[in-house]
Amino acid sequence: MWLLPPGPMRPYNIVYVVIAFLVWWAYCGYFLVLRLVSAMQRRSASEGRGPGLSQDLPTMTVLVPCYNEEKFIGEKVEDLRKLKYDPEKLEVVFLDGSSTDATVQVIEEAIKDLPHFRVIQTATRGKIEQLNSFLPQVTREIIVNTDVDGRLEEEALLQMAREFAGDESVGVVGGYVMPAQSSRLEREYWKLQNQARVLEGKAFSASIVVGACYAFRKGLLEKFPENVVADDIYVAFEAATKGKRVVYSPAVKVYELRSARTSAEFLRHKFRKSNAYMLEVLRFLPKVFRMPRRWLFIYLNKVLQLLLIPWIFVAFFVLMGVLVARYEYETSVLLVILAFSSLFLTNKVLLRLEGSGEEPASVWLGAYAFIISNLVLIGAGLAFPFWRQKSEYFKIGEPAKEQARMGGGQADG
């Protein structure tokens, strides 16, 4: 075997190669298969031609959970007001959690001349609780959930409607979310994640959408489970488990105003998101025997990437040290070369997406983000049995002192 040194094979040599293969599979082989599958099942030329501007549009309810958002809420109302969609088929509902600032007053003043806009005080601060308080009352065909700090391009709702109309199997459509302002590391991380989600969606179903803006069909779920923190992960898993497709659409451009601008914010946010992601992965584990085969393939790779690879990654470097200490350089050098060539292949070829408007992520920053993310996953895994969060906590990108004064806020997307 070319990866093993000459002479008798030792157990740690074989274990090292197996571990290296698992790492390669999780971050290269997986995307290679997705790319091949998506290439073999290109949608028909008619897909994406979308409905007309009025009579063929589905009815929509846009939900905006909010709490103490006077700084952003006026801009959010204006952002939603300018969206191109038939007002007779659209309603916008702000779900306020009894804000202690001027959030409600700002909304009421801004929507005076918008009869299809309204605000409801839910008397609860958590995002999940606010959504659950109103979801059973929704009667329209499509439910859109968007965060206060999410900024949508004018045709975002029309593009979502086209995704649903083009394929009856689509259960969830996620916006292509990008940080409006952030550190370079955060931008590269988002770029890699976005490209991976689009590729998953083309093959079958994206594993996640982003809370800044996503939509789902009425009837997909009545309410979120009370202990859900990441609604964007839960809704994607729920739809895919039920055999529905989750599309992460590059045509639905969304910009998130609050994002990590420092390394400390990046690490804190990724730790919280990793904790929430692990919760949803484990929640759906008992349902593996009911999952469609294509979604099962993606789901099991999420289990591998989130729960196993960080620890396998540590074992990889430990065994590399053992090999180097024993002067067995051949295997170590070959696998390091394989790792970097695979990283380049994944970034420049497998995750290169036409129509996204983005260049491939930096290979070196991608590698750095990969290492940091796996270290965060190790920390989140160690803390998981002992720490849980709610769907309300400090908003990323804002000083803690200011948020404490304002009373906290919604969960980050």
Image (cartoon, helix red, strand yellow):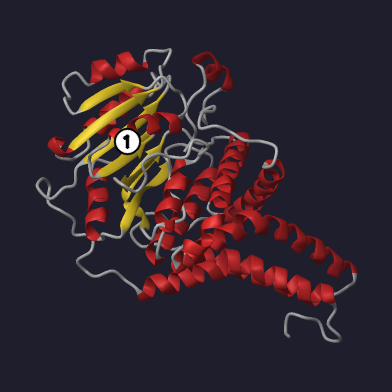
Q: On the rendered image, what quadrant is the N terminus found in?
A: bottom right
Q: Position of residue 260 (x, y in %)?
A: 54, 36
Q: Position of residue 72 (x, y in %)?
A: 38, 24
Indicate the position of residue 131 as horizontal and vertical percent values: 38, 33
User: Dot 1, crowdedness within 10 Å: few (<14), some or many (≥20)?
Assistant: few
In the picture shown, does residue 3 fall above or below 260? Answer: below
Give, as a three-letter code, the residue at label 1: Pro
State left or right for residue 163 relative to residue 395: left
Q: Is residue 188 above or below residue 24?
A: above
Q: Is residue 114 left or right of residue 316?
A: left
Q: Nearer the viewer, residue 363 or 245?
A: 245
Q: Is residue 324 visible from the viewing direction of this image?
A: yes
Q: How many marks?
A: 1
Instruction: Name the element at disc 1.
Output: helix
Position of 195 compared to 83: left or right? right
Q: What's the residue at 26%, 33% (across, down)?
A: 80
Residue closer to the observer: 158 or 100: 100
Counting from the top left corner in percent of width and height, residue 33 is at 49, 72
Q: For mark 1, what is the residue?
A: 136
- Measured along the vertical axis of the image, is residue 26 above or below residue 183? below
At horizontal 39% and vertical 60% (from top left) the residue drawn is 201
- Say which of 71 and 337 sits in front: 71
Q: Residue furthest right?
A: 326
Is residue 148 at least partly visible in the picture? no
